[in-house]
Image (cartoon, grey):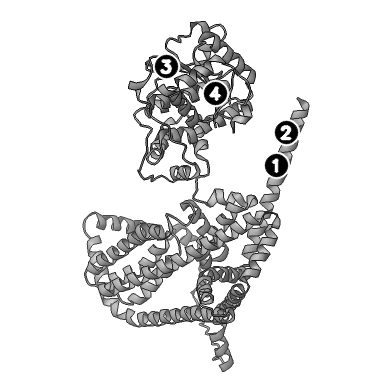
Amino acid sequence: MATKRFEREELFSKSRASGVSTTLTIALVILGLYVGREVFVPIALAILLSFVLTPPVERLEAWRIPRKLAVPVVVATAFLAIFGLGSLIASQITQLANDLPGYQQTMQTKISSLRGIATVGPLKRAASVLEDLGNELNKPNKSEELLRPTSPADQTKPIPVEIRTPPPTALESVASLITPLLHPLATVGVVVIFVVFILFQREDLRNRMIKLAGTHDLQATTSAINDATHRLSRLFLSQVGLNVSFGIGIGLGLSLIGVPSAILWGILAGIMRFVPYIGTFVAAFFPLTLAVAVDPGWSMLAWTVGLIVFSGILTGQVIEPMLFGQSSGLSPVAIIISATFWTALWGPVGLVLATPMTVCLVVLGHHVDSMRFFDILLGDRPALSPPEIFYQRMLADDPAEAVEKAEQYLKERTLSDYYDNVALPALKLAQSDYKRERLPLSRLADIRDHIADLIEDLSDEQDDERSGKVDDLETEAAIQTSPPMPRIPFLIREGLTEKWSGEQPVLCVAERTDLDEAAARILAQILSKHGLGARVATKEETTSTEIFRLTTDGVALICLSVLDTDSRVTVRNLVRRLRRKVPLAQLLVCFWMADSVDQVAENFGADMIVTNLSDAASYCLDLAQPNNEAHKSDSMSDPVTLRVAE
C-alpha cells in the first residue's frame, strides 16, 4: 500500500512539474510573439500570401513557364493589384472628405427633428430631470467659497505668453512627409522578399520541415504538410474570391441606392469580411451613417440595411457552406478567442490574421501529438467521442440528451449500427472504470436503468436503412468515424419450426453485473426487431441458488452477455449451470469487450462466441432458419465443440 501511495505521489509531482514547464514555455512564446511583432507580422503575412500565390505559380509552371519567370510575374501582379487598390481607396477618401460639408445641412435637419421628438412627453421630462441633477452636482460648495482666502494677487490677471516655433526647413518638411511612410514601406518590402523566397524555395522549405518534424514517420509528416497546404490554400483562395465578390456586390448595391463613395464601402466590406463575425458590422457602420446624412428621408437607410443584411445572410449561410463546407475547421468560440488574442498581440493586423493563424495551429494539432491540445481546444470537431458523450450523459443522469443524439444518428444509420458503435462501446468504458475502481457498484444500476429507458424510447424505431440528413455536428462526426456494420437479416416467422416460432425462444442472460444486463437488453431488442422474440434474465436469476427457479419454457437459444473478458472462470461455471438447466438449447457467449474472437477463444462449453452485436444477431437469426436444422442437430451432439464467428 505504501509503495502504491509513493508511486502516485511521484506521478503527481512529475505531472505537476510538466504542467509548470508547459505553462512557462507558453508564456515565453507569447512574450516572444509580442516583443518580436515587428519581425513576426511580416513573416506571417508573407506565409499566408504565399498560400494564395502558390496555385497561380504552379499553374504557370504547368504551362511550361520556368519558375524564375513565373514567381516574379505572379508576385508583381499581386502587389500591383494591392497598390492599385490602395490608391483607389485614397482617392475615394479624398473625394468623400471634399463632399462631407455638403451633407451638413441634412444632418442638422435630422438632428433638429430628433430633438423635437425628444422634447415631447416622457422624454422631455426625463431630459429635464437629468439636466437638473447635473446642475445640482456642478454647484460649488458654499462653505469652501467662504473659507477660501482672497488676496490682491488672486485678483491680478495673468500675463498671456505665446510661444512660436520657427517655420520648418525644407529638409524637416521632407522628413515629416517621409517618416510616416517608412514603417509601412519597410513592412511591404520585407513581405515581398519573404514571399519571393518562399515561392522559390517551397520544396526546400518542405523538406526542412519534414526533417525538423522527424523522418522516422515520413507518411504522417507528409500527410500533415499536405493537409496544411491544401486546407489553407483552399481556405484562403475561397475566402479571397468570396470576399471580393461580396465587396463587389455591396459596392454595386450601394451605387444603385445612391450612397456616396460606394466603391470605397465595397472595398471596405470585402476587406473587413476577413475579420470573423464583427467585420461586416464594422464595415456597415460607415455607409449607414452616410445614408442618414445624405437622404432627407429614411428610405436610403432602409435600403442600405436591407442590402447589407441580405448580402450577409446569402454569403455566410448559403454560398460559403457550398464553397468550402460548414466552417474553416474552427469552433465559433475559438474564432472569438483567437481574434481577441491576436489583436492584443499584433493590433489590427492580428485581427485579420487571427483565423488563418488559428487554422494553422489546428492543423498542426491534428497531426502532431505534442500539439494535439490545439485541435481539442480550437477545432470544431467534438472533443469527446460518441461513446464518451453517451457514457458521460449516463453518468450525469441525463439520458434525454442521449436519446436526442440517438434520434439524430438514426436519420442516416440503423438502430443496430447505433448500438454497435455508440451504446456498447460506452458500456465498455463503464466496465473499464468499474474494474479500475473508478465507478462504484451503486452507479452500475443507474446506468442500466438509463439504458433501459433509452431502449424504451427507441422501441418505435425500425432497424432498417435510412436516407435522412443529420444536422448535428457531434452526430455527424460520430457517423463519419464509425464504419457501417453488416446488415442483419429479417426473419419470416411463418416458415419457422415450432420451437423457434414461440413468443420468446431466445433468453439473453447477464453474466454478473448490471452492465452485462444492459448489453443483454440491447441484444434482446435487436432480435425482437428482426422477428425473433427474446427476453432478459438478470444476474440474480442465474446464481447457483436461484437458477433452478428460472423459467426456460420454450427457450431454444441462450445468449450470455459478458463485458469483463477476465471473468473466464465465472463464464465457464455459468455456462455449465445453463447447460444443466436447458440441455437442449443452443448457447452463444457474447464477449462485448474483446477485440477479436481469438482473444477469448477458449473451451467454455458454448456453441459460438462473438464480439459484436451484428455477429450475435446474425448468428441467432441464421440459427432459427429452417434450412439450418440439420446443422443445429450436429452441433447439439457435441455441446462442448466451440465454433467462432468469422
Residue flagged by tag 4: what amino acid is it? Met
Residue flagged by tag 1: what amino acid is it? Ser
Whole-angstrom CA distance, mark 1 to mark 4, is 46 Å
Residue flagged by tag 2: what amino acid is it? Arg
Would you say the residues marked 4 and 2 are in contact, meaning their CB atoms lie under 8 Å apart? Answer: no
Q: Is residue 158 visible?
A: no
**Which quadrant of the figure has residue 10?**
top right
Q: Secondary structure at mark 4?
A: strand
Which numbered disc, 1 or 2, marks the residue that appears first in the sequence? 2
Residue beneath disc 2: 8
Q: Secondary structure at mark 2?
A: helix
Circle number at residue 15: 1
Circle number at residue 208: none
Give x and y (percent) for residue 462. Answer: 36, 31
Which numbered disc, 3 or 1, marks the residue that appears first in the sequence? 1
Q: How would you rate the neighbour count of disc 3 (Cα within 10 Å): few for under 14, some for 14-19, many for 20 or more?
A: many
Q: How would you rate the neighbour count of disc 1 (Cα within 10 Å): few for under 14, some for 14-19, many for 20 or more?
A: few
Circle number at residue 608: 4
Residue 353 or residue 497, whichever sits in front? 497
- Is 609 situated above or below 59? above
Circle number at residue 505: 3
Which numbered disc, 1 or 4, marks the residue that appears first in the sequence? 1
Whole-angstrom CA distance, mark 3 to mark 1, is 55 Å
Q: How would you rate the neighbour count of disc 2 (Cα within 10 Å): few for under 14, some for 14-19, many for 20 or more?
A: few
Q: How would you rate the neighbour count of disc 4 (Cα within 10 Å): few for under 14, some for 14-19, many for 20 or more?
A: many
Residue flagged by tag 3: what amino acid is it? Pro
Q: Left or right? Give the position of 410 relative to 438.
A: left
Q: Secondary structure at mark 3?
A: loop
Which numbered disc, 4 or 2, marks the residue that appears first in the sequence? 2
- Is 373 situated above or below 536? below
- Is 181 situated above or below 627? below
